[in-house]
Image (cartoon, helix red, strand yellow):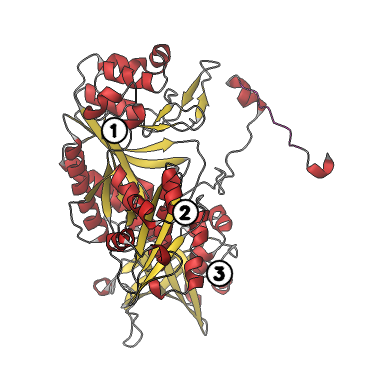
Amino acid sequence: MPPEGKEPVLRSHTCGQLRQENVGQDVTLVGWIDAVRDHGGLKFVDLRDRYGRIQVQISPESINEESLSTLRFDQVLKVSGSVQARPEGMRNPKLETGDVEVMASSAEIIGECPPLPFSPESGDQVNDELRFRYRFIDMRREEVQRRFRLRSDMQFAMRQYLHGEDFLDLETPMLTKSTPEGARDFLVPSRLNPGEFYALPQSPQIFKQIFMISGFDRYMQVVRCFRDEDLRADRQPEFTQLDLEMACIEESDIIDLVEGLMVHVVKEVLGREIEGSFQRLSYSEAMLSYGSDSPDLRSDLVIREVSDLAEGLEFKVFSGAVEAGGCVRGMRIPGGGQWSRKEIESLEPIVTQQGAGGLAWFKMTDDGPAGPVSRFLGGDAGAELIQRLEMEAGDLACFVADGQTRVVVNSLGQLRKEVAQKLGHLDAEDLKFCWVEEFPLFDEDEESGRPTPCHHPFTCPHPDDLDQLADEPLKVRARAYDLVLNGFEVGGGSIRIHQRELQERVFEAIGISAEEAESKFSFLLEALKYGAPPHGGIALGMDRLAMLLSGLDTIREVIAFPKTQRGTCQLTNAPDPVTGEQLGEVGLQAVIQPESPDEDDS
């Protein structure tokens, strides 16, 4: 009830609030009709809001006749009446409000609703295009609201923990300078500066480094970021990250902080305890053992190197791959020896789609190896291979050999994922965090052959590799680390370069001239001259974390208004054309490329 002396509010209680102690009270509720049951003129209505459901009795005396006859699903109903205890035998133990009901003295439809374009009861089975076009209806579902409550709780728990660790919540600009950070920028034309453009930030990277140089040694921000890149199930053009930066630290300081943060978040959001010391893998170890730099450790399947045994096996497919500069690797599948030949051969497309020529295999039986590769396992090399893979009777061993190591890594990495799923290893309730460290500082650009940053150009090189920066840059390791959860990268960070001279050397290694560096990064280079402390940080993907903590496999379900794979919003139909007048104000003109004629028309 409203406090004495104040005007009555539209509602006095929520639909999930009433209990036995409220019996006898007069209340006013507002909610959506969830169900209507007709009992000879008296109607029982289940009224719903995000807090729960309550049963309401509506008599002909409490509402006009036309409204009473047209009560239907998802109309918004305002009800005033008294709370009464439900009779014994009529209580609903499935509802928190199931011991009581409201006897309406007045009821009014305050929000009409035509028949819905889809049944919310069908849930995620409804066509995605339809669900996201009518997202406001989809988000009324209890399951969807539970996901967003989890996301809200996650964000609150993060801020709570970090404020306790003396972090300052600081903001950075949304309209900023276009700088090369790995993906295309979203550009915003400047009306006041014709022909010039802002860029929406791919990350607050440079600004958070400047905070460190400014003396704010612990920075945090929940921030929106933008990247104009091709989309997939776990990517969107705009996304949210928890951005952290710390001064006067090393890698272990960041790792310890984030592990404590994740333990706190999982406990507060899911009510579960997890071990705080996450497994740490080097990049090379992750790629060798799991075929991925984001390994899913819910499965204990491990890939083994067997290239050194290829010559002794006298199997030309294996030895030829090694001679061509590639490798041979294999994976033991416990119990896979029980699979039929047809089941085993059904795995081959998994690796051929990654570029492999095929899948070699053998089973381990009580009488020894059996299958296509078994005839090459008779000697010492074969015995060593069986021992290295720790083969036991009933197991299956699968191998990929190729002249390109990349093909072997990708093939067995994908095979490992598929087999882990087949074996039932990937329980969504199981949370397996790990760290991957010591990434390469650079990749080789396929087109130019030039080094390009694996993360971004502000990542500090490993001090043991600095002498290779100019002549062998692809061998240089980065002081970088990724946080991985259940096969997804959920965070990436690094120790940053805090010396201007080293930053200029890295720019030079990736082909950024002194003139270009001055044009694009003068403000950072200038700041690095004036007493920059050692610093580093990490960005955690809020969308992916919310997805995984919700037990889902797509971030679209934890984003209120997601984009499609073509980058469109199905609710608002953005992007769409603007008027010529609007374009003229910012000095632009739209040029529509003509569609290519169909072959039949040419």
* SS at mark 2 in the image: helix
For residue 478, which numbered disc appears in the image?
A: 1
Residue 494 position within the rendered picture, expressed as x and y whole percent measured from the top left: 27, 34
- Marks 1,3: beta carbons within 8 A: no
Residue 327 position within the rendered picture, expressed as x and y whole percent measured from the top left: 40, 47
Q: Main secondary structure of the magenta part?
A: loop
In the displayed image of the protein, which residue is found farthest to the top?
Answer: 515
Residue at 23% in and 22% down: 213
**Which residue is identified by label 2?**
317
- Marks 1,2: beta carbons within 8 A: no
Please state which amino acid type lies under the numbered disc 1.
Ala
Residue at 21% in and 20% down: 532
Q: Is residue 535 above or below residue 514?
A: below
Q: Which residues are magenta?
A: 588-596
Residue 454 position within the rendered picture, expressed as x and y whole percent measured from the top left: 38, 34
Please state which amino acid type lies under the numbered disc 3.
Ser
Q: Quadrant of residue 142?
A: bottom left
Using residue 400 as the reference point, say whether residue 309 is left or right of it.
left
**Which residue is identified by label 3?**
67
Q: Nearer the viewer, mark 1 or mark 2?
A: 2
Q: Is residue 445 visible?
A: yes
Cα distance, mark 1 to mark 3?
69 Å
Q: Is residue 132 above or below residue 376?
A: above
The quarter of the picture where the N terminus appears is bottom left
- Marks 2,3: beta carbons within 8 A: no
The answer to which of 254 and 6 lies nearer the viewer is 254
Q: Nearer the viewer, mark 2 or mark 3?
A: 2
Residue at 46% in and 33% down: 183
Name the N-terminal-most of marks 2 and 3.
3
Task: Give the crowd class for mark 2: few <14, some 14-19, many >=20 residues within 10 Å.
Answer: some
The answer to which of 106 and 481 lies nearer the viewer is 481
